[in-house]
Amino acid sequence: MRTKPLLPLAALAALPATAQQQPNVIIIMADDMGYGDVSAYGQTSVSTPNIDRLAHEGVCFTDGHATSATSTPSRYGLFTGMYPWKNADAKILPGDAPLLISPTQFTMPRMFQQAGYHTAAIGKWHLGMGYGKIDWNKPITPAGNAIGFDYTCLIAATVDRVPTVYVEDGRVVGLDPNDPIYVDYNENFPGEPTALTDPEKVEMQWCHGHQGTIVNGIPRIGYMKGGQQARWKDDEMAQYFLDRIDHFLQQNQGPFFLYYGLHEPHVPRTPMTRFAGSTPLGPRGDVIAEADWCVGELVKMLRKRHLLDNTLIIFSSDNGPVLDDGYDDGARESQHLHDPNGGLRGGKYSLFDAGTRVPFFIYWKGHVKPVVNNSLVSQQDLLASLARLIGQDIPEGLDSEEMLDVFLGKRLGGRKQMVVEASGRLAYRSGHYALVPPYQGPQTNETDNELGVVDHYALYDLSADASQQTDIADQHPDLVARLKAEFLATVGTYYSPDTEQETLK
């Protein structure tokens, strides 16, 4: 596929030098932030003024989707422009998993590199590192740099998984060679405290799936030994990554591409002191306020360096929300005050709409006018669209659709159809209709989120029933038959109605 520059070459030649500079691009990806977690969509229980500004002064999508209802496959779809369900390994990864994206694969950051951009990935990663069992005490190759990032400073997986260290350009930050790190996801190391062996050392109580190594009073998934000096402080993580972004901006005035992976509001929720107790929703509300502050601090950095006018900012989330995801932090008790789904059904891990419908805003000061777009759009289409923006080619065969004018608010519209994924299960969106195929397995999981497991092809009209309370399949058999045929033609052998819900932890 041949993409085209946003402006014809003759028009570019007529512009002053400052106007010819390629725009900087920043993607801010929140972690487990739901459609109802930002006040731009109408909730009033926690304020998100900095995120709201991107929505109110940019393009606000009310039907914007991640490609998956869980983190690893969602980010895979973002960076590769491919449906994650086409890669059998694109599922929730442990902290010591090998790099999921091949160093030879076409990716969004590599595309920006080829266009002469400085590229960086800072924050939450969860796409694996290395080729197999990682030796954390040596340079890790391939790291995130191998898929197109000049600079990386990352957490390998999630905040609740070991190893609890920062990895900068493939090296653990602050590692004492006399205190080497060892990680195992099957067996604990002799003498290392866990939530089961040393419960008196636990300061944040776990309720499922988080009974491994205790770090900073918080039990994690997996087992870790050593690296005491390198272990992060949970309540300092937000500031740490902002400092790394500030350093990157000092070194690279443009053009640059920055992927900023927020760790909020994923568990464990440990807000910095200034936000602890700042909302009526407990730690989950507090870290949403912290995430909003992080967005505001990034915008301040850009404005201070006179970069804001030439920087396209995309804000979204990797999947839908979850309240109790392994720690007893009071999130369930606050649900009567706040609906993170924003009236939608499901949430993280679910094929119902709240699994993948997420906050989705595009802001570019002076270039994008405020627009509310109610059409269906997907994060995986950012790759093809940004390719057109910077005048780059992309290979044939990607699932990414070019819709730059939609993302820049120049026209309304979006995708006609889309397949969404949740832990190996697939569903289909066609316009305002949602088709959920039959699957085996439990209706809900330990998080209490409905998984979207039904025993027949269920059909919902989201234009009349956004909360998916009424299955209209029996009333519209012809429509079900047509959408079923479209779905099966799209997914082919990737769909199996016998799929059981996978272990989520």
Image: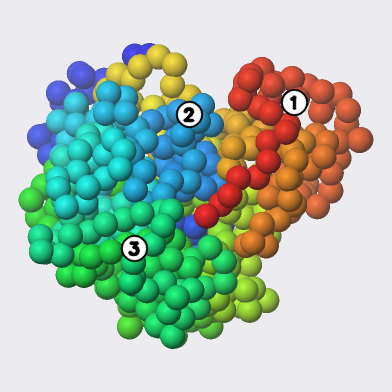
Of callouts 1 and 3, the N-terminal one: 3
Residue found at x 86% / y 24%: 478
In the rendered image, which residue does mark 2 sit on? 87
Between 463 and 27, the one lying in front of the other is: 27
Q: Is residue 52 left or right of residue 133?
A: right
Check disc 2 and give the amino acid type: Asn
State the separation of the CA atoms marked 1 and 2.
24 Å
Residue 364: % across, % down: 32, 47
Of callouts 2 and 3, the N-terminal one: 2
Residue 476's quadrant in the figure? top right
Between 431 and 92, the one lying in front of the other is: 92
State the separation of the CA atoms marked 1 and 3.
52 Å
Q: Which mark is residue 189?
A: 3
In the rendered image, which residue does mark 1 sit on? 483
Marks counted in the figure total 3
Residue 399: % across, % down: 48, 24
Which quadrant, please, contains the N terminus? top left
Check disc 1 and give the amino acid type: Leu
Query: Element type at marker 3?
Result: loop
Of callouts 1 and 2, the N-terminal one: 2
**In the rendered image of this protein, does residue 481 appear above or below residue 448?**
above
As drawn, the residue found furthest toward the left would be: 251
Q: Is residue 242 visible?
A: no
Q: Mark 2, mark 3: which one is toward the viewer?
A: 3
Q: Is residue 18 visible?
A: yes
Residue found at x 33% / y 83%: 273
As drawn, the residue found furthest toward the right would be: 475
**In the rendered image of this protein, does residue 272 appear above or below residue 12?**
below
**In the rendered image of this protein, does residue 61 appear above or below residue 202?**
above
Residue 41's quadrant in the figure? bottom right
Residue 86: % across, % down: 51, 26
